[in-house]
């Protein structure tokens, strides 16, 4: 089984290019079935959640190709509107096929996405809002069945922000009959990026206020070629790692305009940040201050997806910090693993109290979910001595190559053990890489032999 090994205690120094956004591309993959023409997505990260979503869309009858960060989808012939349980359970964003299948086929059948280690992850908002658009839901053996004679434009008002529910309503509305006005919509960049993607496909979507949009249903959407933006959570993870190791790092393509709350927080701990037109420079040499209180929040507040990574940074601050998690009810599990590394974190129901310690000590820790896993990598980079991290499969869901990225920034980090890519798209990537390696070796051999 594959593990990550780190010999920590040295500052990160160097630069790396930030990958394409997981949470932007996943709904775009689902949305690509809203047209029967070809969709091309560029700058896509080679991560497990993308592989899983591509498997799901192939199950629907689409033709898919994924090479060198470019996904091509041909949804000309959708053969069914059912999402398979065993694949869907692997990825939360399978729920966004609800909106796109309703938009394309006026029906959908998919398993309840279920909870995960960070919370119950209910879908009541998805159902309530789509019912208002004329969708009828039934449930059988943990499978959600949705259908509609006609999806009607209507007025919707979210009483609680939900990224996924917003994306589902948008995808159901773009081909609906009439005008849909949505108030109180989640304004995360990934929701607005989905609107831009759909607009490029011919959808009529206007942002009428900060958290209000208006969608006029059209008869058809056309194919598109679209550049996926950089991943703000991966960028934020690396920014926090630079500060946590007191290093200096330049993150190419980091989306500064979507990271204001993270930049503000890093300045609070006394890091220096410079936003350039092609990325962000972080000087974390003196980033040792604690944060008396910070809470995660809906965008543009501090992202819940960076909460665990911030906790790692604060474990060795020069004063106590309190972090409140306001989005998910069970996102503190990583504290137990950090405490195994000599951290001193007290877990309340919705708050963490981080009492500062002089240093973290390397040991064996276990990742239980994606962002907690990234937080453990940061802790390993900070800690004195050797840290090993089990549970790489969680980290691989969202980080294309966290080990080589940190190696490029000077970290003493590697993976040990075999990872046999189970997914055919991953296998294709691995074969491609092997082929490239063999070709490089062959070229090099020939060049030497030709001397
Ligand atoms: C998206 O999840 C992201 N995932 C999450 O990132 C992110 O943490 C989350 O938005 C919040 O920003 C993807 O984009 C694939 P929500 P989503 O619906 O859409 C409650 C990562 O690490 N809620 O905005 O599932 C829910 O329980 C992942 O990349 C309801 O109560 O999140 C949560 O408390 C983790 N009823 C809150 O709303 C509903 O019907 C926000 O959930 C739906 C949600």
Image: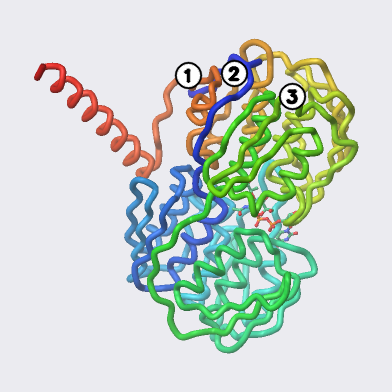
Check the image and name the residue furthest to the top: 385
Q: Earlier in the sequence, mark 1 or mark 3?
A: 3
- Please, which colouring scheme is shown? rainbow
Tell me: 154 left or right of 439. right
**Residue 48, horizontal then vertical, whole percent:** 48, 43
Element carrying mark 1: strand
Q: In which quarter of the image is residue 9?
A: top right
Do labels 1 and 2 touch, CB within 8 Å? yes
Question: In the image, what residue occupies the spot 35% across and 72% down?
Answer: 37
Which residue bears the numbered disc 2? 388
Give the quarter of the figure containing the C terminus.
top left
Q: As drawn, is 76 to the left or to the right of 380?
A: left
Q: In whole angstroms, how far apart are the C-alphas of marks 1 and 2?
A: 9 Å
Task: Name the residue: 46% across, 78% down.
Answer: 202
Label 1 crowding class (10 Å Cα cut-off): few <14, some 14-19, many 20+? few
Q: Quadrant of ligand 1?
A: bottom right
Q: Looking at the rendered structure, which numbered label has been put on residue 338?
A: 3
Marked residue nearer the N-terminal end (2 or 3): 3
What secondary structure is marked by label 2? strand
Task: Identify whether 323 is placed above or below 298.
Answer: above
Taking the view exactly as shown, the residue that stands out farthest to the left is: 450
Q: Residues within 10 Å of mark 2 (few under 14, many from 20)?
A: many
Give the image location of residue 305, x and y in percent. Answer: 68, 45
Q: Residue at x 75, y 38 (%)?
A: 266
Whether 305 is drawn above or below 353: the answer is: below
Disc 1 marks which residue?
416
Q: Quadrant of residue 356?
A: top right
Report how far apart the C-alphas of labels 1 and 3 lie in the structure: 21 Å
The residue closer to the viewer here, 121 or 306, is: 306
Viewer-proximal residue among 262 and 31: 262
Question: Residue at the location (63% across, 49% down)?
Answer: 256
């Amino acid at each position: 089984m594959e593990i990550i090994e780190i010999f920590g205690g040295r500052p990160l120094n160097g630069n790396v290019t930030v990958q394409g956004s997981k949470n932007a591309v996943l709904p775009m993959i689902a949305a690509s079935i809203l047209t029967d023409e070809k969709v091309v997505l560029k700058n896509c990260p080679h991560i497990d959640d993308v592989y899983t979503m591509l498997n799901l869309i192939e199950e629907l009858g689409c033709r898919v190709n994924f090479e060198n960060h470019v996904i091509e989808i041909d949804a000309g012939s959708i053969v069914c509107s059912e999402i398979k349980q065993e694949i869907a359970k692997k990825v939360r964003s399978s729920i966004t096929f609800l909106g796109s299948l309703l938009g394309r086929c006026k029906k959908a059948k998919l398993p309840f996405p279920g909870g995960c280690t960070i919370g119950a992850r209910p879908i009541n908002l998805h159902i309530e809002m789509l019912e208002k658009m004329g969708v009828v839901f039934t449930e059988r053996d943990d499978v959600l069945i949705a259908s509609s004679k006609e999806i009607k434009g209507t007025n919707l008002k979210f009483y609680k922000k939900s990224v996924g529910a917003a994306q589902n309503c948008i995808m159901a509305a773009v081909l609906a009959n009439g005008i849909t006005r949505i108030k109180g919509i989640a304004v995360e960049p990934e929701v607005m990026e989905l609107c831009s993607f759909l607009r490029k496909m011919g959808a009529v979507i206007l942002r009428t206020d900060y958290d209000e949009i208006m969608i006029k249903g059209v008869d058809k959407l056309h194919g598109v070629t679209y550049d996926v933006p950089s991943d703000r959570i991966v960028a934020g993870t690396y920014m926090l790692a630079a500060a946590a190791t007191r290093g200096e790092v330049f993150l190419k393509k980091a989306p500064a305009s979507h990271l204001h709350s993270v930049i503000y927080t890093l300045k609070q701990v006394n890091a220096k940040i410079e936003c350039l037109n092609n990325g962000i420079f972080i000087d974390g040499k003196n980033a040792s201050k604690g944060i008396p209180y910070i809470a995660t929040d809906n965008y543009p507040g501090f992202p819940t997806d960076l909460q665990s990574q911030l906790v790692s940074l604060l474990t060795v601050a020069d004063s106590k910090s309190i972090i409140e998690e306001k989005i998910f009810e069970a996102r503190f599990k990583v504290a137990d693993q950090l405490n195994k590394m000599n951290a001193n974190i007290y877990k309340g129901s919705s708050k963490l109290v981080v009492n500062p310690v002089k240093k973290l000590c390397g040991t064996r820790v276990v990742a239980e979910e994606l962002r907690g896993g990234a937080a453990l990598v940061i802790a390993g980079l900070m800690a004195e001595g050797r840290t090993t991290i089990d549970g790489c499969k969680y980290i691989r869901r969202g980080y294309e190559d966290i080990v080589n990225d940190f190696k490029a920034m000077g970290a003493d980090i590697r993976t040990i053990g075999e990872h046999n890519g189970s997914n055919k798209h991953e296998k294709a990537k691995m074969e491609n890489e092997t082929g490239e390696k063999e070709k490089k070796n062959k070229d090099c051999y020939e060049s030497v032999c030709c001397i």
